[in-house]
Amino acid sequence: MSGFLDEMGRASRERADAARATESVAALERRAAATPVAPPLVLSPAGFDVIAEIKRRSPAAGALAAVGDDWLARARDYARAGAAAVSVLTEPTRFDGALAHLESAAAALRPLGVPAMRKDFLVDPYQVLEARAAGAGGVLLILRMLSAAQCAELIDAAERCGLYVLLEAFDADELARAGELASARAGRVPLLVGLNCRDLQTLAVVPARFAALAASLPASAPAVAESGVATADDARRLRRLGYRLALVGSALMRHPDPADWIRSVLRVARTDAAQNG
């Protein structure tokens, strides 16, 4: 595991332990059970979708949200423009996130029929339950951070909570592992398999990895291109490589009209799917 993921994993474990000391599992389960069910993740038959992200800060790029940015209005704009889901960073130290952001976004998105997804460095099933209690419809799990036993526990927790799971991979071995998990869990919990093209040592984005690893994408789950998607042409190229969705954060946070960006990307990628299969 990289130094960055080590750091994030330790901090995440500390947050989970502190939260459990404040609210027991039983109390959190009661709160989660009382939370309205999130809308399901629905992928378009048109052949390409976007998971749009609320990311206030990036360790590599610094602040992404301007002072006074209405990120909640941004989340609604994402949904109205056609995003299949809205990813919300909840990591506080390097991304300026919070569980309260997830809760607010989930409540705002529920009437629009779009689920919120908790994106964090999750290491404990308690944190999956936290996501459910905040109203999320899905969670992201980073395979490189988790042993087989840990990953199974987290997916089991997602299944109990009725959440979909995005399994994030960084290389061919992790894509194979994700594919095996998706095959084993078919029909039990909705799974997506994501390839993040970020270099974990330098935190630089390496878009060439999408093509280099396209042949390793598993057939058992929809593939998600993560990081490095900036234009409609990027989306069209990724669709042709076999990616079914793109998770986009920094490009949307920096764009003056993120809703227009989403509509443009979906139009271009879906037109290409209709014309070229």
Image (cartoon, rainbow, N blue to C red):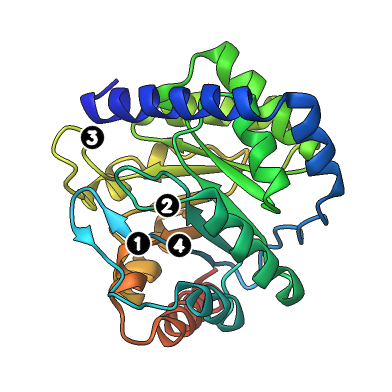
* Disc 1 secondary structure class: loop
Q: Which residue sits at x=47%, y=55%?
A: 243
Query: What residue type is disc 4 on?
Result: Glu
Query: What residue type is disc 3 on?
Result: Leu
Please identify, in this view, whether the residue under mark 3 or under mark 2 is nearer the observer.
2
Q: Is 274 positioned to the left or the right of 98 in the image? A: right
Earlier sequence position, callout 2 versus callout 4: 4
| Up/down of 276 relative to 173, above or below | below
Cβ atoms under marks 2 and 4 closer than 8 Å: no
Q: Rounded to the nearest whole Å, what is the CA distance between mark 3 and mark 2?
A: 20 Å
Can residue 244 be seen from the camera position used here? Answer: no
Q: Residues within 10 Å of mark 1 (few under 14, many from 20)?
A: many
Earlier sequence position, callout 3 versus callout 2: 2
Give the numbered dot on residue 56: 1
Residue receiving disc 2: 97
Query: What residue type is disc 2 on?
Result: Gly
Residue receiving disc 4: 53
Q: Nearer the viewer, residue 60 or 142?
A: 60
Q: Is 221 positioned to the left or the right of 142 in the image? A: right
